[in-house]
Image: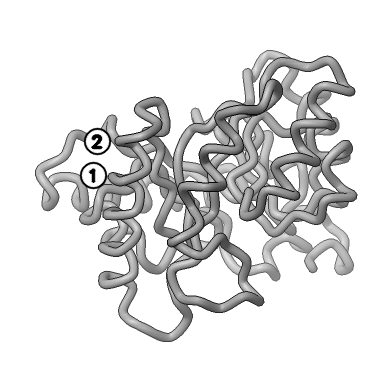
Amino acid sequence: MSGQRKEQLAKALEQVEARVRKACEAAGRAREEVRLLAVTKTFPASDAALLTDLGLTDLAENRDQEAGAKAAEVARLRPEAGIRWHMVGRLQRNKARSVVRWADEVQSVDSVRLAAALDKAVLAEGRPKLDVLVQASIDGDPARGGCPLPELGELAAYIARTGGLRLRGVMAVAPLGADPAPAFEKLALAAEKLRRDHPGATELSAGMSGDLEQAIAHGSTCVRVGTALLGGRGLASIASGSPGSAR
């Protein structure tokens, strides 16, 4: 089964790579300017391990409960892979200590209170600085997380003053059921403004399976791709052999 699954993933990766290359060419950008982040949520550690065999070492999760055990299992399966794990989902402050034990980067920091909790957890764990992105709200929907655009500067300034966090840039999720281009344009302007005050905050994480082309056209440096790489959630149960694996 692993051989068949690896072929599926290799074909999907080839297709995603072609889309990214074409989008970069259309935007007059080099392919190297855009990082491909594989979102492995709901899929088994075996899939994540196969992705590393195919050259993808930036992997992302959106739930701490799933990610910690998966990261440990992938480390056991591929101890030499050099994986960087990214937290891309909404994060509660009480999960900060757990998250800093497995994540190399948290892309979903949307409040000073969460930043403070992560900073405290990093210092308590005695680990190197944690890379973080501020999550911007570009659709105004509080249920989806994100810091309101007028408050991004304040949040970024707080992170820059901490001892345990390193500000790397901005992340956002496109609005549901609407043309993402205007939102990505708004995000690009906010990111440019942030970089004027924080030159090291060069990452712009935007674009997923359905809208990566529009995101790259508006300057995204990191696309977060799950479905286009790994398939629908049903494949998670097939890959792991357990009907209850997908969630």
Lower position in the chain sequence, tag 2 or tag 1? 1
Rendered view: 29 above or below 92: above
Residue at the (42%, 49%) spot, across then down: 223
SS class of the residue under badge 1? helix
* Distance from the alpha carbon under mark 2 to that under mark 1: 6 Å
Q: Position of residue 165 (x, y in %)?
A: 65, 28
Q: Amino acid at mark 1?
A: Arg
Residue 244 located left or right of residue 111: right
Residue 166 located left or right of residue 2: left
Callouts 2 and 1 close, C-beta under 8 Å: yes
Q: Position of residue 18 (x, y in %)?
A: 27, 48
Residue where numbered disc 1 is placed: 21
* Crowding near the residue tagged with mark 2, few <14, some 14–19, many ≥20 C-alpha atoms within 10 Å: some
Q: Amino acid at mark 2?
A: Arg
Residue where numbered disc 2 is placed: 31
Query: Which of 153 and 167 lies nearest the eye of the viewer?
Result: 153
Residue at the (79%, 65%) spot, across then down: 246
Residue at the (41%, 54%) spot, across then down: 206
* Crowding near the residue tagged with mark 1, few <14, some 14–19, many ≥20 C-alpha atoms within 10 Å: some
Query: Which of 235 and 223 lies nearest the eye of the viewer?
Result: 223
SS class of the residue under badge 2? helix
Residue at the (27%, 70%) spot, across then down: 181
Q: Is residue 11 visible?
A: no
Residue 225 located left or right of residue 165: left
Q: Position of residue 105 (x, y in %)?
A: 63, 34
Q: Quadrant of residue 128?
A: top right
